[in-house]
Image (cartoon, rainbow, N blue to C red):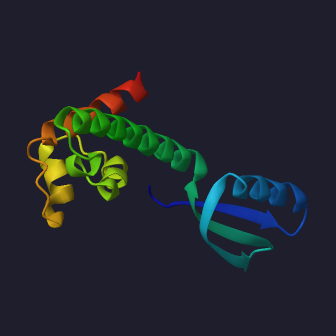
Amino acid sequence: MSTEIRTFRIPDSDADPAQAELSAFLRTVEVERIDTAYADGAWRVLVLFQDLRRKEESLQIETAIAAALNGWRDRIAAQEGVPRDAILPDDLVPEIARYAPTTEHELGVLVGSRDLDIGPHGAEIVGVVRSTLEDLID
């Protein structure tokens, strides 16, 4: 998620409407930084923020992917008679959900530094991520 910028002008005369607009805006975002400056009879307010709606959408997508991966892991682990952590480590599920790799290459880059062998299940993992994303779009 990227940082966005919005500026507000709060004039000395009749500041209430501009302050109300700024206040309403601040309730809908996650503020990273606010800078102010005064010039020409008005305050300039620069807000660096992340949109909470986009953040919420991202969290919903991550949650859906993690749930789908956990369901898939449970099924495969039961079929193979192994613990689900042997199929895909618990700590890797949120990372895959966050980055949502849609190709085996992307998945390989994501898990490459962990010395894990997901080769036998790489295509299935990517398939779970893809189908979950497709379901969310429909």
Between 13 and 97, the one lying in front of the other is 97
| Residue 52, visible in the rendered structure | yes
Figure quadrant of residue 35? bottom right
Between 10 and 29, the one lying in front of the other is 29
On screen, residue 132 above or below 13: above
Q: How many marks?
A: 0
For residue 7, side relative to residue 2 (left or right): right
Figure quadrant of residue 67? top left
Kindly identify the residue that appears in the image at 27 percent across and 54 percent down: 89
For residue 54, side relative to residue 84 (left or right): right
Residue 58 location in percent, x, y?
47, 46
Kindly identify the residue that appears in the image at 37 percent across and 53 percent down: 94
Residue 46 location in percent, x, y?
63, 68
In the rendered image, the quadrant that contains the C terminus is: top left
Between 37 and 77, the one lying in front of the other is 77
In the rendered image, the quadrant that contains the N terminus is: bottom left
Kindly identify the residue that appears in the image at 42 percent across and 29 percent down: 136
For residue 4, side relative to residue 118 (left or right): right
Residue 121 location in percent, x, y?
14, 41
On screen, residue 91 above or below 56: below
| Residue 129, visible in the rendered structure | no
